[in-house]
Image (spheres, grey):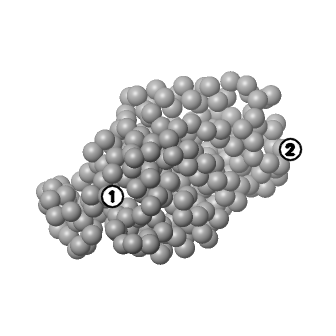
Amino acid sequence: MAYYSRRLFCFLLCNMVALAFIASSHANLSPTFYDKVCPQALPTIKKTVEAAVKKESRMGASLLRLHFHDCFVHLGGPTWQVQLGRRDSSSAYANETTDLPGPASNLSALITNFNKHGLNVRDLVALSGGHTIGLARCTTFRSHIYNDINIHPSFARNRQAICPQSGGDNNLAPLDHTASLFDTVYFKNLLKRKGLLHSDQELFNGAAGSTTNSLVKTYSSNFGAFASDFANSMIKMGNIRPLTGKQGQVRVNCRKVNS
């Protein structure tokens, strides 16, 4: 699904290459970046994405993951004004993905990684809530369900039926049991020690004074607070070291650097 979602956005964005060249004199990200050169750009993209999500519910999670990965390296939910005008990098290195927090990261590593990118603990917990939609591969949660102690025993057994100790690496499990709805079930699950990924459950360990416990509790019972913080954190993440103006390039094929 991540591959299909990337193709979808590449199709939309590559059809706007000429527009980006016209607007490239602007040096800052702005939600009105394309208003003059292509006033129908956002409605067109919104309509296309909504149709894709309706056809395949996992598309929503794939698009969130795409935004998260791209920004860190160079569905009933909230809405926010997307800052437009970001240009493409003129380089692409696979090893840059190691700068992303992984599913086995502990809380200290997660906080350090987010801080390095100008994001705080609130951003960490809110953005982790993006796991309220989507699925995860067995290989990303196997160690958690077989080796960790901060997991509900019956939940671990249930997931072990999907993910054996050997083989089945690509077997899928929902990140929460309402995997196609943007809601607070993800956080409710953490309170019950039913986080699918080790990095998810690290946000709530029940220890007094934990920097993230209170936020998990708040979001679990207050969708408005979660939705608001999620939108704000998505905007912050979208502003991580953007290339604007004459920086970088506008790729003819957004999946690879111009030749």
Q: Is residue 161 above or below residue 142?
A: above
**Which residue bears the numbered disc 1?**
190
Q: Nearer the viewer, residue 258 or 168?
A: 168
**Across the whole image, how many numbered discs are drawn on residues?**
2
The kind of residue on which mark 1 rests is Leu
Which image quarter is the N terminus in? top left
Q: Amino acid at mark 2?
A: Ser
Could you say which is closer to the camera, residue 127 or residue 2?
127
Disc sitting over residue 212 in the figure? none
Residue 25's disc number = 2
Left or right, 9 with reference to 257 = left
Residue at (48% x, 74% y) in the render = 109
Secondary structure under the numbered disc 1 in the rendered image: helix
The spot of residue 212 in percent (x, y) is 46, 65
92 sits to left or right of 156: right
Secondary structure under the numbered disc 2 in the rendered image:
loop
Residue drawn at x 51%, y 61% is 124
Residue 180 location (% of width, % of height): 35, 38
